[in-house]
Amino acid sequence: MKPEIIVALDYDEFEPAAEIVKNLGSSLEWYKVGLELFVSAGPRIIEFLKENDKKIFLDLKFHDISNTVKKVSLAALKYGANIVNMHASGGVGMMKETADAVSEYCVKNNTAKPMLIAVTLLTSLDESYLKDNKLNFASTDDYVLHLAKEAKRSGMDGVVSSAKETPLIKKELGSEFITVTPGIRPSFASTDDQKRVVTPKDAKAMGTDFMVIGRPITKAEDPVWAAEKIKEELI
Ligand code: C5P
């Protein structure tokens, strides 16, 4: 199904994360493990997801010198994550060296290559970030598009972006270039602390490939009901 729903497991320990995965059962397939859960629970949560035949977005947002990001990305391959990400602002050299090394390793070892996704501009940052850092872009959209272009020419498979940026990214970089989109709020859910939200239906219309959804599912009274309702919204 496109877009796929990825449940954000934003927990600080293993048990509640495992509990929600078990509770959702066969309703949903994809889960995002971010820094908080990975640092708190360790690789055990990844093993648990694999044992339960789930697909994994390892959201650790690597950003370091090229050699380090290349090596940590190769180390991450052992988890069998389906999506791994890094910051586009780490530069073309960092992304390209990593993409080349990961592709080479996967071909050599006959293993599936994870999708390599670049984080463009964090949505917590705005025009003042461009100004403060003397980045000469007319708008955050221009900067996001610039970073997405850098990611593509480095051999990355796609970017994390807001749904609103997706049509421009797809238009400029092609429909095959993947977009992963947080900030999604189904019509029945509260917006929580998200400021610029998009409904699943609108995100689909904008061409998003993967929607990251956390609290509307994980904090719902009935997470299975919430997941099914979101799927309905996508039809
Ligand atoms: O609960 P909620 O649906 O808001 O969770 C969204 C998830 O996506 C969280 O893990 C959050 O950290 C992540 N995210 C985001 N906005 C970004 C990047 C990541 O909400 N720009």
Image: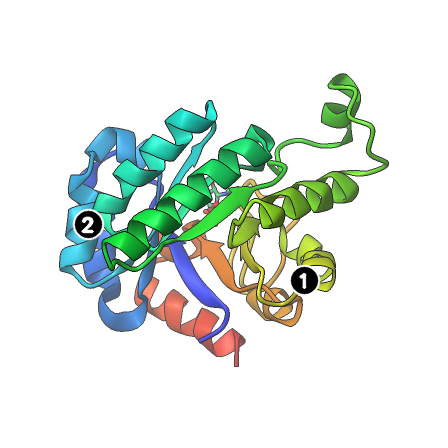
Which residue sits at x=67%, y=47%?
149
Question: Quick check: 15 left or right of 165?
Answer: left
> Closest to the observer: 23 or 112?
112
Sequence-wise first label, 2 or 1:
2
**Residue type, numbered disc 1:** Lys
Disc 2, SS: helix
Q: Which picture quadrant has residue 168?
A: bottom right
Q: Is residue 141 above or below residue 24?
A: above
Q: Specify whether residue 78 is in view.
A: yes
| Image coords of residue 136 (percent x, y) | 83, 28
Q: Specify whether residue 222 is in view.
A: no
Which residue sits at x=73%, y=63%?
171
Question: Quick check: 5 left or right of 160?
Answer: left
- Circle 2 Cα neighbour tier, 10 Å, few/some/many (<14 / 14–19 / ≥20): some
| Image coords of residue 113 (percent x, y) | 35, 56
Disc 1 under 8 Å from ligand 1? The reply is: no
> Closest to the observer: 217 or 147?
147
Residues marked 2 and 1 touching at CB (< 8 Å): no
| Image coords of residue 47 (percent x, y) | 16, 48
**Residue type, numbered disc 2:** Ala
Q: Which picture quadrant has residue 229?
A: bottom left
Q: Is residue 112 above or below residue 79?
A: below
Q: Which mark is residue 170?
A: 1
- State the residue position of label 2: 18
Question: Quick check: 9 left or right of 185?
Answer: left
Q: Is residue 191 above or below residue 72?
A: below
**Residue that lies at the very extreme toward the right in this rendered image:** 138
- Circle 1 Cα neighbour tier, 10 Å, few/some/many (<14 / 14–19 / ≥20): some
Question: Quick check: 139 left or right of 116?
Answer: right
